[in-house]
Image (tube, rainbow, N blue to C red):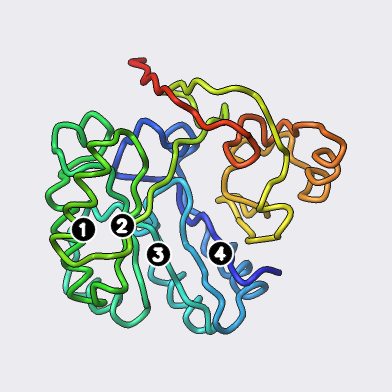
Amino acid sequence: MPDKIQIEITTRCNFDCFYCAGRHMPQKDMPLDLAYSIIDKHVRPGMEVNLQGEGEPVLAKHFWSIVQRVHEKGGLPYIITNAGYTITPQMAENFIQYFNKVHVSLDTTDPERAEKTGRHNIHRVMDNILKFGDLLGKENVGIVIVSIGRKDIESVINFATRNGIKNVSAQSLQTKDDYMIKYKLDYKEDYHLKCPYLERDIMRYFNVEGIELPCCFIKDTTQYVSAQKLREQMHKGIVPQSCKGCRFIRNQETKKVIVRTS
């Protein structure tokens, strides 16, 4: 088992980001007993446990119970949150008690652009980033950008720089069919079939149903058999259906984004 696991504790969210696969998945929370069984079986002392999937983790019905269980097992709970909620005094205490670090998803600082993307009340999000900095220390707060435009990325980097937040990273949009529902990416199907998640065994991902996967990018599990089966297919030069279009096994980056209106 790798030193990192990720558990999708909910698919529900208070945002409507056009690129999020979770907005087109059944909206549900992972049952508490299922979450506990995964944690009890796989979490080791010092292991990073990312309580993250295609929903806002803090909205999960049993969020703090799950966090506490990870902590009791010696794991290090971690989330990427949209921070689009009010941080109550009790929540602030809990974050201080259980979290060494928190990352916040922020794609732009422009309120109009944010709304078009599906992100709401962006000023509250930015205020909460600063609040997390006060609670955990700025060095323990990061910002994750989904790349929707160069100017948007620059605006987030400028915001982070002004406020002393040094941990900023950017992610490209996915090119898999189970993501591209409200947007379309132009790309060439030129595959190298060297998946880092399969070759280096980076992590384990447990989706909201408890299905164990080698990465967090397989949303349609109807044709998924096992990580070993994916490896065998790739070694034969076959693109597995579960991996078709994935940016991690293609040679060429995407160049154009078309956002659908329906």
Residue density around tag 4, few if under 14, some if 14–19, many if 20 or more, within 10 Å: many
Left/right of residue 178 with respect to residue 56 in the rendered view: right
The circle drawn on residue 87 is none
Left/right of residue 35 with respect to residue 12 in the rendered view: right
Per the image, label 4 sits on a secondary structure element best described as helix
Nearer the observer: mark 1 or 4; the answer is 1
Task: Give the residue type at disc 2.
Answer: Ile
The image quadrant where one finds the N terminus is bottom right
Please tell me which of labels 3 and 4 falls first in the chain: 4
Are circles 1 and 2 on residues that touch, CB within 8 Å?
yes
**Mark 3, residue position:** 63
Per the image, label 3 sits on a secondary structure element best described as helix
How much space separates mark 2 and mark 4, taking CA atoms? 26 Å
**Mark 4, residue position:** 35
Task: Give the residue type at disc 4.
Answer: Ala
Please tell me which of labels 1 and 4 falls first in the chain: 4
Q: Is residue 227 above or below residue 63?
A: above
Are circles 2 and 4 on residues that touch, CB within 8 Å?
no
Q: Quadrant of residue 80?
A: bottom left
Per the image, label 2 sits on a secondary structure element best described as strand
Residue nearer the viewer, 202 or 49 = 202
Residue name at image x 26 percent, y 77 percent: 136
Residue name at image x 25 percent, y 71 percent: 91
Left/right of residue 163 with respect to residue 16 in the rendered view: left
**Mark 2, residue position:** 143
Residue density around tag 3, few if under 14, some if 14–19, many if 20 or more, within 10 Å: some
